[in-house]
Amino acid sequence: MSRTISILGSTGSIGTSTLDVVAQHPEEYKVAALAAGRNLDLLMQQIEQFRPELVSVATAEGAALIKSRFGSAVDVQVGDEGLVAVATHGAVDVVVTAVVGAAGLLPTLEALKKGKHIALANKETLVAAGHLVTTLAKQQGCHLLPVDSEHSAIFQCLNGERRVDVERIIVTASGGPFRDKTRAHMEQATLQDALNHPNWAMGAKVTVDSATLMNKGLEVMEAHWLYDMPYDKIDVVVHPESIVHSLVEFQDGSIMAQLGAPDMRVPIQYALTYPTRLPGNYKRLNLLEASSLHFRAPDLDRFPCLRYAYDAGRAGGSMPAVLNAANEVANGLFREERISFLDIERVIASVMERHDVLSNPSLDDILSVDAWARIAAHEVAQKL
């Protein structure tokens, strides 16, 4: 069955991998719309190859450049309105949400209102507003198809199973570049150290989140909403090889796991083809070469961001949006080399301490606390 897709974040890591999947199966997919930020050179290459009807860019200057190159062959829009236009394009069946951060929330909600299925690679959407997104998806009969390797693994392990039989979900973590480092080492860590991920090629924001283990905390919060699972039934284990992508334990003691080589194109393709599968020209896992697999508990003293995520999730209401916004700011300041690596966790903890939780927040409430938390995070960072 041929599907028409749009991609929010087409020039990022997930976006380019998605287009690689599309290029391998041109008879199965048509790309109707692309949203990118400021990487105009790559976007123009994508327009040449995939011929979308609509593109969105961050700035009016960028839009003018695209128009000068392609003229009337492609409709060009700008900013948040452009993101929403790409997400709600009339011909689209599946929207791949691969923009980074809370910017993915509004276009995802608008896409669901239009009955679009969502291939979700934007953790922050569910973290900040999981109750709104999942409720709307159910009302509209839309799938939330996970793209992250961990959530794709859980999704596949749960296929055909009754949720009442699930004892717990076990989310695996590579441990990031500092998994075997001391706090003293991390206190002196440079940006380049944090970006040197041992297993995965990801964008800078996600890679830094992986280094703090906040990425895993966000995935725990995602799992809570995707699988309607209480936090006490969601565990994290460090698995340095990144071969077991996640596991599900059932009440009879059985554990199902999904394994594969660490290649994001595999879960992306599954999200696009669900409930069927297509051939994939990707590296295959050789268990004989893998030899042995290792697992250990995460160290929440060395990596408190994971604990903060559990705390925010259990607090519920507006606290997850506050944690997410504070993390986005702190992560960005570290990438700009304006604060130290461990300052990231200090900013997050301080902003969370300042916040009085709103229960069952509306979209306006979430946007308001998101803005508040970003201002507070900058204020905290200036005093470090």
Image: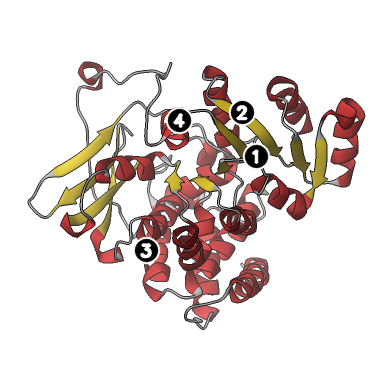
Quadrant position of residue 299:
bottom left
First in sequence, mark 4 or 1: give its number.
Answer: 1
Circle 1 SS class: loop
Q: Helix, strand, or loop for circle 3?
A: helix
Does residue 347 appear left or right of residue 259 in this picture? right
x then y, percent, for residue 137: 48, 58
Count of labels shown?
4
Colour treatment of the image: secondary structure
Q: Which mark is residue 30?
A: 2
Q: Please report contact status of discs 3 and 2: CB closer than 8 Å, yes or no.
A: no
Q: Which residue is mark 3?
A: 307
Q: Amino acid at mark 2?
A: Lys
Kind of residue sitting beneath label 4: Gln
N-term mark: 3 or 2: 2
Of circles 2 and 1, which is in front?
1
| Label 4 element class | helix
Kindly tell me whether residue 300 is visible in this rendering.
yes
CB atoms of marks 2 and 1 within 8 Å: yes
Label 3 crowding class (10 Å Cα cut-off): few <14, some 14-19, many 20+?
some
Q: Which residue is mark 1?
A: 91
